[in-house]
Amino acid sequence: MAENDRSVLGTDVELPSRGLPYGDKLPGGVVRVTPWTTREQMLIAGSNPAQSLPAINTLLDRCTPTLTEVGLRSVDLITADRVFLLIMARTVSHGQSYPVRVKCTVCGLQVPHTFRLPDDMEMRFLPDNWSQPFETLLPVSNARVQLRLLRGHDDMDIERYKESLVRQDQGDIIGDPTYAYRMSKHVVSVTYPDGRVVENRTKGDMGSVHAWYQSLHAMDDAEVRNTVAEHDCGFDTYAELSCIRCSNIFEVGLPLSIEFFRPGRQRERPPGRAVDLNSHRRSDVGRSGSDGAVATSADPDQVPGPETTGGGSPSAADGGRGSDEGAAAGGGVRSF
């Protein structure tokens, strides 16, 4: 497919952030998304998507010519915008239908479900008066904390941190070992009650902030999570399902399986049919704190089949449940 044909087949979409975090580079947050070609699908072929951040970054760069034109890369975007663009690129490439099999959390039955992208997901946009860093007062320690949203660069750093833990082969790792590290990345500065200020600018600063965050009272941690969620944006990608065997009702986040990138024949519409994505232009629809959870799982059951476990885990953002709240429960890779 020639580049000019590819652009014609693309569509203009409005980022959840509306371009506000990027100064004057993306006025209105409008970005053109083009379909990916076999060349892009080769990036994912034979790999576990949950462990393919560099490939996903390259895919996003190739499918968003607007970013190149203004001197941005996908890793410069906040995580919610990255999740949004990947979903939109998948939609213009393979259509709206995304069938998955979800394991019931009670009886284990594989419950079929089809996500309609992006129609099944509510969107929350950043308001006109949004700015960062944003600030909150922690209820227990009385420290005043300035916070920011994470970007693709942060996602990559979190993934490297996770890989370093795996290389160390620490047998006592349980839950989400990256949770405190990820939350520490949100911290811009900490002002203690006695007036001392710690800024998070260098790797040395990050080490100090990480150690501080690991010892935070649970109520302080919740305050940070909720504050980040209140200032975030994006898709709410959770679906509520009912098991046809035991009637258990459970939630699942959008799984990122091979089927997401290379769907089979279950699609409900023929290729080439136009898809109206403008229905997700800016509106007030969306849950508070919604920022587009995409559950990426290293579960081998998901490769090559689109199978995941109920109660899906938030990734880059988590659809109104607090920016990193779900990570403590130990589900899914959250960096994207």
Image: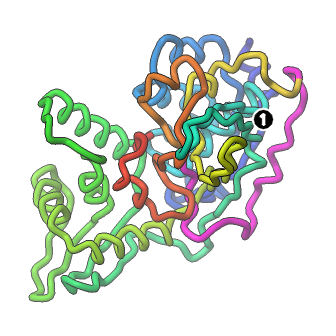
Residue identifier under label 1: 96
Identified by mark 1, the residue type is Gln
Specify start and end residues of the magenta stretch as a single range: 270-293
The dominant secondary structure in magenta is loop
Does the stretch in magenta take in 306?
no
Does the stretch in magenta take in 289?
yes
Classify residue 302 as left or right of residue 54: right
The residue under the point 58% across, 47% down is 252
Protein image colouring = rainbow
Q: How many marks?
A: 1
- The quarter of the picture where the N terminus appears is top right
Percent position of residue 19, x then y = 59, 56
- Res 299 visible: yes
Q: Judge by depth and name the residue closer to the eye, 318 or 196.
A: 318
The residue under the point 57% across, 22% down is 258
Please say if 203 is above or below 46.
Answer: below
| Quarter of the image where one finds residue 225 | bottom left
